[in-house]
Amino acid sequence: MSEAIRVLIADDHEVVRDGLRMILEAEEGFSVVGEAGDGAQAVDLTGKLLPQVVLMDLRMPRMDGLEAIELIRDAWPEVAIVILTTYNEDDLMLRGLRAGALGYLLKDTNRQTLMDTLRAAARGEALLLPDVIARALSAAPSGLSASRRASVKEPKLTEREHQVLRRAAKGERSKEIAAGLGITERTVKSHLSSIYNKLGVDSRAAAVAEAAKRGLLDEGAEVRM
């Protein structure tokens, strides 16, 4: 049997932590190694326990989840972070993804989605949920104004990179993107690497968040050959 995925739960509500622990402990392949009630404790326990995945609430006392994400990503970049979010935290969720979180979960998500997302995060992959992405994109600014575009250097995505990025934003995996565009999965990963470099991010989730912020996912967004 493969080693269990080590998970740290960070949420200031004890009932949420208890519920997540019960679900994970009842599922083979997961081990809850610790619980944190605020961001500062989450950072401290990450250093002591070195979990593979941290489930991170965004609104917590002493230190919020956004600051905790940044500190953990700086000190332990190998630790995957999955945001715990609610339906009224779209902006915070996007900021968390740009800060380095690999994915996100709604607090009322179903058991299978929780397991799938944690397994993907442990592998270093982002499992994006199309419905949440759709809400996040609708809440994001619709792009930069003309005056801002004149003063801010926009990344020059190729037409193919733009196609890959839009499919990634819909929650498609690399294999699905490859099939949809008629290219190899290796080529998709190459395009994603180029997109990350141009947007200054290091994950698919962060790329989607940054693209939403810049308006690059809008219909008719400019692309360069």
Image (cartoon, grey):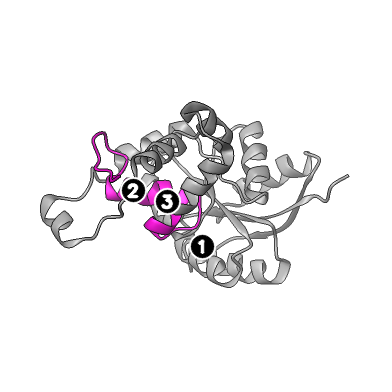
* CB-based contact (under 8 Å), mark 3 and mark 1: no
The quadrant in which the N terminus is found is top right
Region of the chain picked out in magenta, as a range: 196-225
Mark earlier in primary sequence (3, 1): 1
Residue 142 - label: none
Q: Amino acid at mark 1?
A: Ile
User: Relative to residue 40, is residue 148 depicted above or below?
Assistant: above
Q: Nearer the viewer, mark 3 or mark 1?
A: 3
Q: Residue furthest left?
A: 147
The answer to whether residue 153 is visible is yes
The residue under the point 66% across, 68% down is 45
* CB-based contact (under 8 Å), mark 2 and mark 3: yes
At label 2, counting other C-alpha atoms closer than 10 Å, the crowd grade (few under 14, some 14-19, many 20 or more) is: many
Residue behind mark 3: 195
The quarter of the displayed image where residue 80 is located: bottom right
Residue behind mark 2: 157
Q: What is the x, y in percent for residue 97? A: 45, 53
Q: Amino acid at mark 3?
A: Ile
